Image (cartoon, rainbow, N blue to C red):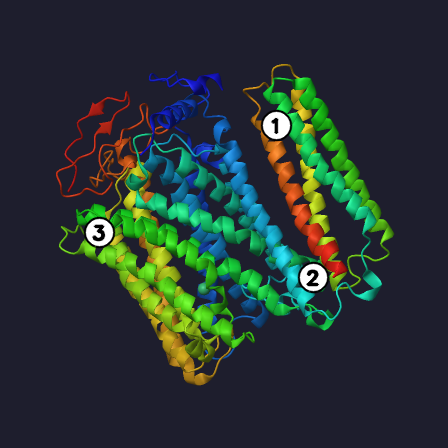
Amino acid sequence: MAQAQIPIQSMPPMPPEMPKAWKWYDYFTFNIDHKVIGIQYLVTAFVFYLIGGLMALVMRAELSTPDPDVLDPELYNALLTNHGTIMIFMWIVPAAIGGFGNYLVPLMIGARDMAFPRLNALAFWMVPPAALLLIGSFFFGGAQSGWTAYPPLSEITANTAQSMWILAIVLVGTSSILGAVNFVVTIMKMRVPSMSWDEIPLFCWAMFATSLLALFSTPVLAAGLVLLFFDINFGTAFFKPEEGGDVVLYQHLFWFYSHPAVYLMILPIFGIMSEVIPVHARKPIFGYKAIAYSSMAICFVGLFVWVHHMFTSGTPGWMRLFFTISTLIVAVPTGVKIFSWVATLWGGKIRYTSAMLFAIGLLAMFVFGGLSGVTLGTSSFDIHVHDTYYVVAHFHYVLFGGSVFGIYAGIYHWFPKITGRMYNEPLGIVHFVMTFIGTNLTFLPMHSLGLHGMPRRVAMYDPQFQTLNQLCTFGAFLLGASILPFFINMVWSWINGPEATSNPWNGLTLEWTTDSPPIVENWETLPTVTSGPYEYGMGKTLPYLGINGAEVAEESATS
Amino acid sequence: MIDSAQTNELIASSDDAHGLSDHEHHDFRVFGLLTFLFSESLMFGGFFATFLVLRGAAAQWPPEETEVELLLPAINTIILVSSSFVIHLGDDAIKKNDVKGMRLWYAVTALMGVVFLGGQLYEYLTLGYGLQTNLFANCFYLTTGFHGLHVLVGVFLILGVLWRSRREGHYSDTQHVGIEMAEIYWHFVDIIWIILFTLIYILALL
Ligand SMILES: [Cu+2]
C-alpha cells in the first residue's frame, strides 16, 4: 500500500459508495459497518431471548404441578435443551460479545471500524442459519440431551435433531472464533495513536480477555462435537464404552470449552459494569489496573478449572483436589472486580439511572451467585447437590442476575448513543423493579429445592416440592411480564424519544466525542486522547468533535 | 509508550481505514491469520488429546487387524516437509520482485500437495479397513482426513495465488500479503502433519 507509508493529515474525500447514514433496510443486508453489525447482533439476540424466554415460561407452567400434565415429557426435554442452548449461544454470547463488542470497541479506541469488516459481517451472518437449525430441529423432535449433550443420551435420542443441534453450535462457534480474531487484532493494532495500553477503556480490556479465551477454548468444543457427530451419523465409537470409547472424554472436551464459556458470557458484562459505574457514580474507577489485569487472570486461571463440572463422573481424588483449589482461586480476581466497583460507588454522587440501577442490581445478584458458585466448586459439597435445582439456582443468578442485568445496563447506558434518542426513565425503573423482584422470586426458592433433593431436568417431581415450585413459576411469569415495559420503552423511545445530545451522561470515553448516533466511519477527524477514560469529578469534560472535526461546545449536559 | 515510527504506522493505517473502508486491512491480515491458526491448532489439539486418551485405555494400539503401513506415509511426509521449503523459495522470489519464480515454486508446491493427497487416498484404499472398523480406525481416519482437508484448502489457496498472479503487477516485492499468507498456512499444515505422523505412525511402532 503506497498510501499506507505516508501519514496523511487531511482526510481524503468520502468514497461515494459510503453514505452518511444508513437506511433502515441496510440493517437487513450484508453490511460491513461495525455499528450496523453490532445492532444486528443485539436485535437478533433479543428475538432469541424472547423465544428462549417463552420456552422457559412453558416449562415453568409444566412445573406448577408435580404431574407432567401440560407437556409431553419428551417435548419438555427438548424445551429444556433448547432453552439453555438458545439463551447461551443465541442471546448472551451474541448480545454481549457480538452486539456490544462490535458496536463499542472501535468507538472506544478511536478506530473507524474493526480490523476486518468483511470477516465481521460474515461472522454475524453465521448466526441466523444456526438459529434456523435449532428452531428447525423441533420438527425432528428437538435435541433432548440438555445443552451439555452428554453421550450416551445424546447418541440414542432424536438423532436428526441432535445432529442439527451440533451443526448449529459448530456454526456459532466458528462465528465466535472469527469474531475473536477480529477483536484481538483490532484492540492491539487499531487504537488511535494517542491511546496507550493503560488508557484503554476497561470494556475493551474485557473484550480482549474474552476473545483470547474464545480462541483458546471454542475449537476444543468443536472437536468434541465433531466426534459426537461422527458417533451419531458415521458409526464411529469415540464415546461408546461398549466398543472401547470413553464417555468421560466427551465431558472433558465439552467442559474445556464450556467452563470458559461462562467467562465469555460474564467478562464483557464486567466490562460494561466498569464503564457504567464510574460514569454514573461520577468518580474515577477504583483500581483500573487491578480490574484490567484481573480480566487477564480470570482468562488464564479459567482455563484450568473445568473438571469442577465433573466431580461425580468417577473423577479421581487428586483431580477433585486440584480442580477444587483452582476453582476457588478463580474467585479471587472476580472478587477484586467486585470490591473495585463497590469502592468506586463508595462516596460517589450516584445518579440512579436505569443503567446504574441494573449495575447495582447486578452487583448484588452476582455476589449471591458467586458465593453459591464457591460452594459448588468445592467437591465435597458439590457431590451432594450435583444435578439438583441448587445448580440451576446458581447459574441463573450468575447468568440472569449477572449477564442479563449487565446487558440491560449496557442497553440503557448506550441507548442514547446508539439511537440518538433518550429513553423514558420512569419506565426503565419499573422495568428494573419488576426484573429484580422476578429474578429473586424465580431463582431464590430453587436453592432450597435443590438442597432438599429435587433433581433438575425433570417434568414431574415429588409433591412435597409443589409450593416452592409454584413460587418459582409465579416469579417466572413476573419476569416474563417485565419484558413489556422494557420493550415498549425501547420501541417508543427509538421512534419518539427526545433527541439525545452527543454526551448525555458526561462520559469520558471516546464514543461520547462523536454524534449520537455516530456517523458512518465514526468521526470526520479522529479524536485525540488527552486524559484517562475515568477521570470523573475532576472537572474534565470531553471535546465534542462535530461534523467537520472542530470542537463544538456541548450544550450543557444533564448531570 | 508508543515510539514514533509505530505511531506513524498507526496514523497511516487509520487513514487507510478511512479511504478504503471497503477493504480488509492488508497490514493486519498476517497477524489475523496467525491468531486464527493458533485457534485452529487447538481443534487438532482436541483430536490429538482424544487419540492419546483412547490409546492409553486400549489393551493394544493399534489392534492386530488394523496395523498401519509405514513406507508410503514416510514418503508422503518427506514430500510434505520438503514442500515447505519449496514454498519458501517462492516467497524469496517475490521479495526479489520475481513473479515468474514465485509462480514456478508455488506451482511445484501445489503439485506436491496434490501428490500428498493422492498418496493419502491410495493409503486409504489399500489399508483394508475403514472408518468404522474399530476405535483406532475411527481416530486414524478422522485425524488424517481432517488434516487432508486442510491440505486441500492449502492447495486451493496456492491456486488462488497463482490465479491472481496471472495479472501483471498484482504482486510485487512490496505487495504480496496473499502470498505470505498462503505460505504461513502451508507451514501450519506441515507442522500439524509432523505431530500427526508422530502420534499415529511412530507411536504405533513402540
Ligand atoms: Cu465451570
Is the residue B127 above or below the residue A202 in the image? Answer: below
At x 41%, y 82%, the residue is: A452
Q: Amino acid at mark 2?
A: Asp
Dot 2 lies on which element? helix
**Residue density around tag 3, few if under 14, some if 14–19, many if 20 or more, within 10 Å:** many
What chain does mark 1 sit on?
B
- Residue closer to the observer: B164 or A354: B164
The subunit letter for the residue under badge 3 reads A
Q: Earlier in the sequence, mark 2 or mark 3?
A: 2
Q: Quadrant of the N terminus of chain B?
A: top left
The amino acid sitting under disc 3 is Phe
Same subunit: marks 2 and 1: no
Residue A496 drawn at (x, y percent): 29, 39
**Observer-nearest of A207 and A411:** A207
Instruction: Please identify, in this view, whether the residue under mark 2 or under mark 1 is nearer the observer.
Output: 1
Which image quadrant: the C terminus of chain B?
Answer: bottom right
Please indicate, yes or no, whether residue A478 appears anywhere in the rendered image.
yes
- x, y percent for residue A56: 45, 64
Residue A457 in percent (x, y) is at 51, 72
Residue denoted by label 1: B179
Q: Does A508 sit left or right of B198 as displayed?
A: left
- Which one is in front, A190 or B96? B96
Q: Is B178 drawn above or below residue A312 in the view shown?
A: above
Callout in the foreground (2, 3): 3
Which residue in the structure is indicated by mark 3? Answer: A286
Q: Nearer the viewer, residue A397 or A478?
A: A397
Residue denoted by label 2 = A231
